[in-house]
Image: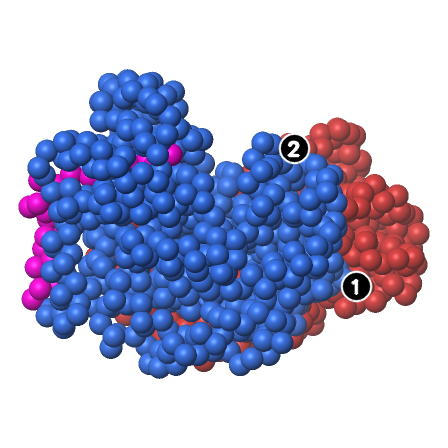
Amino acid sequence: MATLSSAQWRSYSTNSFPPSSSNGRQNNHRLLSLSSPVLRKSPPAVFCLQQSQGNSRPNVVLMEDGAVVTPVNPAQKKEAAIQKLEDGLLSSSSISTEELKEAAGFDVNENESSVSITVVGASGDLAKKKIFPALFALYYEGCLPKHFTVFGYARSKMTDAELRNMVSKTLTCRIDQRENCGEKMDQFLKRCFYHSGQYDSQEHFEALDKKLKEHEGGRESNRLFYLSIPPNIFIDAVKCASSSASAASGWTRVIVEKPFGRDSESSAALTKALKQYLTEDQIFRIDHYLGKELVENLSVLRFSNLIFEPLWSRQYIRNVQLIFSEDFGTEGRGGYFDNYGIIRDIMQNHLLQILALFAMETPVSLDAEDIRNEKSHTRGGVTHPGYTDDKTVPKDSVTPTFAAAALFIDNARWDGVPFLMKAGKALHNRSAEIRVQFRHVPGNLYNRNIGTDLDQATNELVIRVQPDEAIYLKINNKVPGLGMRLDRSNLNLLYSTRYSKEIPDAYERLLLDAIEGERRLFIRSDELDAAWSLFTPVLKELEEKRTIPEYYPYGSRGPVGAHYLAARYKVRWGDLGMEE
Amino acid sequence: MTFTTHFSHCSTSCNDNSKLFSSSSRSSPAIHYRFSGSRRLCRYRINSANGNPLKALPSLPISESAADYDYDDNVETGDSHSTLSITVVGASGDLAKKKIFPALFALYYEDWLPQNFRVFGYARTKMTDEELRNMISRTLTCRVDKREDCEQKMNNFLGRCFYQAGQYSSEEHFAELDTKLKEKEGGKSSNRLFYLSIPPNIFVDVVRCASLRASSATGWTRVIVEKPFGRDSESSAELTKCLKQYLTEEQIFRIDHYLGKELVENLSVLRFSNRVFEPLWSRDYIRNVQLIFSEDFGTEGRGGYFDNYGIIRDIMQNHLLQILTLFAMETPVSLDAEDIRNEKVKVLRSMKTLQLEDVTLGQYKGFSKGGKLYPGYTDDPTVPKDSITPTFAAAALFINNARWDGVPFLMKAGKALHTKRAEIRVQFRHVPGNLYKRNFGTDLDKATNELVLRVQPDEAIYLKINNKVPGLGMRLDRSDLNLLYKARYNSREIPDAYERLLLDAIEGERRLFIRSDELDAAWALFSPMLKELEEKRIVPELYPYGSRGPVGAHYLAAKHDVRWGDLSGDDS
């Protein structure tokens, strides 16, 4: 297998951008602040976020036949050199040198450098259920560098042994590689340590730093902090980690999880505060939906299959549906949730991210910055029609646990195509999927065989993100037999039948990417700003007016209001059709 | 079937008997039921061919409601005044025994035939009705999913079968047949269908006698003929001319049983009722199209007939070419037979006449494997020892129109190969500026999309797409978006092509039959090349029995920048 585009270097230079980029920043700002329905009428704008290119860095992932990623950790020094190159002009000879190194699959410095992963908030649920198991899985598959250590950091007093004991309870081995599991587990646990301290204490972080240094043993050190803590202590922890526990010789990166604020202002404030202590390229905002296998596959489907390329526009696509549902309620997590609601919890981040990936133009390359530029570009064009409906909530709270929304992208590709989102808790099933409904066949010769409901006879592409990953395309087909009757059949790809390999958890992919400095699946500050500016006005209005959500029974298909919203845009929810 | 006629007929008069066969109970588009309100739905049968409950219609109990009105109702009211007599000329032959009688029984079993129908066998052999019935009964089978009453139905069917012995060129004997037919018709309005299951050299004699002596006086008379329709442009034109002395174009039903295959029928549905395929169907996206036919056995005793024709005439010029025209035609004005056939003729007439260099030939030779000897073609006792008749051929065809200019249509047909299959493969172009180029390695041909329609065996449609291999990192592979008929339509058997075609002939639906001008155009493409082959006595490349065919096929494909999809390794 070839390496993943080392040609990406070239894409950093400004002149490789398409000519349409001349619109630039000004325009962009104007549109991003738009929120009222009036704005839908504004002319489609073309954006290009050139100003953010300075942050771009190389991302190299080497692959082997066994689908194992060989991690390459470019050291900070190397990066600095690269940065210089970017600032100046890239000479082709330097590219090929880099390529050679990358192709060789190792770096001379690699054996000398170490990675320390500190999980801040190590005693929390997410850490136990997701982060430690993901780290173990990466270790198990040989994806972590040779010298790595995992540190737990939290307020509780605990010994290393206690941490290991706690961690060990949630580790599992891949089904397809059970051998040596126990042994590997022990080896992994031996590299886990614990440090207890307050989240806002410089002193305690200094103590952590000392401990880290000890384990790094004079090697070049790279440090990754995973903040698995409540948002109100983000800044404190970042401040302390940055000023007292940053790596002296390698990179220091910080992974933060949602919520990233609760509206434009608070998000901007959080970003500003983070940037006091960190540069943009140190911040890794995680959206674990972007680590899902089928979300990753979305770009592959679009850009490596000729048959989909001509279809990906308003000319053929009637509407796009992004659907998320959980079959359980808040059940204990209500305190956090009630303050945010389903729109902030699911739509503004997960679904909007998927939408942006779905709708973006072809990026210049697969490089992170090119992809994130295209995503921002898409997002910049989305305007909200000023209408969200259907919310339901327990008791006296008016926090929605269900929401449906229609979004539009005012650009040449998507003008007039409704992007419908739907997210809810305590519904009849658990699923996350993308549905693409295609237009009717003009002058369909078989109209008579289809009856009056032509909506039943359009093609639909379904990408099921979870559970049971699958891709299927609904096509009209003749029912075998004499006579001529049509029905919709599926062209199917069910992952469980095609791929025997276990699909890695989203956190594994994202942790690995953060270690490797691959930013494709993380959210850039300007992306976040744009995402909030879409939703903030509506969210504000909802709260000011204390709009009461519609009720729906636990375990139902959600409030009927969602159907009316869809009907308004001539859409029929694909997941609630009779066929599903 | 013309849907226009069909529907208007139904909505206006349910008891109109005169058009019985031209607008009968075929094609029941059940979706229609839901929205027809109070309109009386007279003729739609849902019980038989479409027994599979359709997901497209989940909200209404279609099957029950359908059963309520249509079951046999039309037979009582609609069919009692007219009769249908189907005469199988050449009743003692193989095709008749293996295909025609079983297909007729299947149609009867599933209630597609009108109430007053009779089946007559006609051949030179002396036989009684009883002997005929005995002979037929051995090859009749019942549908797997509906075994009940099988025995009884079989007996009912056999009770309607009769035999008449006679010479094929004797008007007198056909006059006797006519007497017998009249007797059974009992003075009712009569429609007569003759199925000529006889060698081509007596086609015209039989048609003359049947037409002159045994035509229906009160209803229609139709004649089904099977290939070969001549062996080149001249002989085909001659045959057509002779047939037309006695029959009008509307009476001639030239059968190509490949057109009755489920997936060939579905080809138009796929193309014209799916928005996702429509924009792809041209030279802009399609790199090449492959039409592949292979059998895993040789002539084995049937060599006498075959040797005179060869694989090109036997398979390519008719079956594969027919599929090609259906694949490539422009959107017809409607689904009416004449509209579709007009478009097919246009394709044929836009095609480049085949040249010698567009073709590669092969002939299988003996091969011994595991102690078993597989005989070569010339080992067949019915084949001359020095025969150079091709048992394998590959050809590249081109359509010089706006849609297909430059797109190679490759055909491949052979006997005694390693598999038995018939399929259509559509290979799409490369993705321009593919972002994932580096993930594919050097062989970009492996990274293009491909649509495969497998006609037989195991009917299936699948679309090869590039997909990310699940896991960390970024590796791509080709996966299939699949529709395996066995899995989707599991409970029912797909009807034999002969059932569909017989029913169409009975109903006067000509869509799947070949019109005279189509046949002329098809021959015009192949005749010059066939002549040259014979004049120059071009020797075919030998290939072992059970192999993948001569390598020459790969060179022919390479010349046009094509790689055979069936031999590419990831598809066995």
Could you say where residue B299 lies in the image, as x and y percent from the top left? 40, 45
Q: Chain of mark 1?
A: B
Could you say where residue A488 lies in the image, as x and y percent from the top left? 63, 52
**Quadrant for the C terminus of chain B in the image:** top left
Residue type, label 1: His
Q: Residue visible at 74% across and 49% down?
A: A550
**Quadrant for the N terminus of chain B in the image:** bottom right
The answer to whether any part of residue A487 appears in the image is no
The residue under label 2 is B144
Q: Residue visible at 32% across and 72% down?
A: A50
Q: Residue visible at 37% across and 48% down?
A: A235
Which residue range is magenta in the image? A93-121
Whether residue A120 is in magenta: the answer is yes
Looking at the image, is B298 positioned above or below residue B35? above
Could you say where residue A23 lies in the image, as x and y percent from the top left? 39, 81
Give B433 or B177, whichever is nearer the viewer: B433
Which color was chain A given? Answer: blue
Q: Residue visible at 25% across and 67% down?
A: A54
The residue under label 1 is B6
Residue type, label 2: Val
Looking at the image, is A371 positioned above or below residue B293? below
**Where is residue B222, by image quadrant?**
bottom right
Whether residue A567 is in magenta: the answer is no
Q: Is residue B507 left or right of residue B517?
A: right
Could you say where residue A421 lies in the image, as x and y percent from the top left? 59, 55
Output the letter for the chain in red.
B
